[in-house]
Image: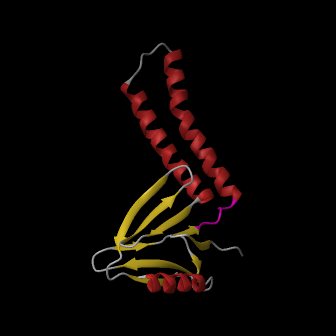
Amino acid sequence: MKFNQAEFIGNQLFIKGNKSPIVVRITLIIVLLICLLIPIAITITLMSERKGPHFGIFLSFIFFWGIGFYMLRIILWNTFGREVLTFEDDKISYEADYRYFRDGKTSISTKDIEVVAVPTIDESAKLGILIFTNENQHIDTVLRVPFDKMTELAAEVNNRY
């Protein structure tokens, strides 16, 4: 079984996710295409019946393309998703990288910071996540990496700060 990988490159820690199964990604792409095409089909149908533009057409574009955008994010995360932690002298920054855009940018002060590797609920797989905490902030990683690797990473970060 192939697990997610985590590695330091310079002052950044990259936690890479595994691709989801191809069947799941194809299903999501089909749902995305349906969401993109429904408002276009509605517009063509209404225009062919010589009915003018309606407010509902604009609502259908907003609604279905909003769902489509969300589906695109899910597809990109399940295909290219990775977490990027940037270590600076006074703060640690976190962001989720979807390859074509980034999201969830947060940062935490390194003053009194503690980094802990926490095992996931499914202990048979022996995976874990990292939790960064200080007196009033916290950051949790999402992608699971083998717990031994996470323990090493937590020790290395704690040694830096």
Q: Is residue 157 magenta?
A: no
Q: Position of residue 143 (x, y in %)?
A: 54, 70
Count the labels in the image: 0
Is residue 145 left or right of 95 when viewed as pictured?
A: right
Which scheme is used to colour this image of the protein? secondary structure
Question: Relative to 20, is 70 above or below?
Answer: above
Is residue 28 left or right of 46 when viewed as pictured?
A: right
Question: Relative to 74, is 141 above or below?
Answer: below
Residue closer to the observer: 135 or 41: 135
Is residue 21 left or right of 15 when viewed as pictured?
A: right
Quadrant for residue 10, please give it: bottom right
Q: What span is colored magenta in the figure?
A: 16-21
Q: Position of residue 99 (x, y in %)?
A: 57, 53
Regarding residue 118, the answer to whether it shows in the image is no
Q: Position of residue 85 (x, y in %)?
A: 48, 68
Regarding residue 101, the answer to whether it shows in the image is yes
Quadrant where the N terminus lies? bottom right
Q: Name, please, the residue furthest toward the top.
A: 50
Question: Residue drawn 62% across and 47% down?
Answer: 29
Question: Residue drawn 70% across and 73% down?
Answer: 2
Question: Residue drawn 65% across and 57% down?
Answer: 24
Quadrant where the C terminus lies? bottom left
Instruction: Give the main secondary structure of the magenta stretch.
Output: loop
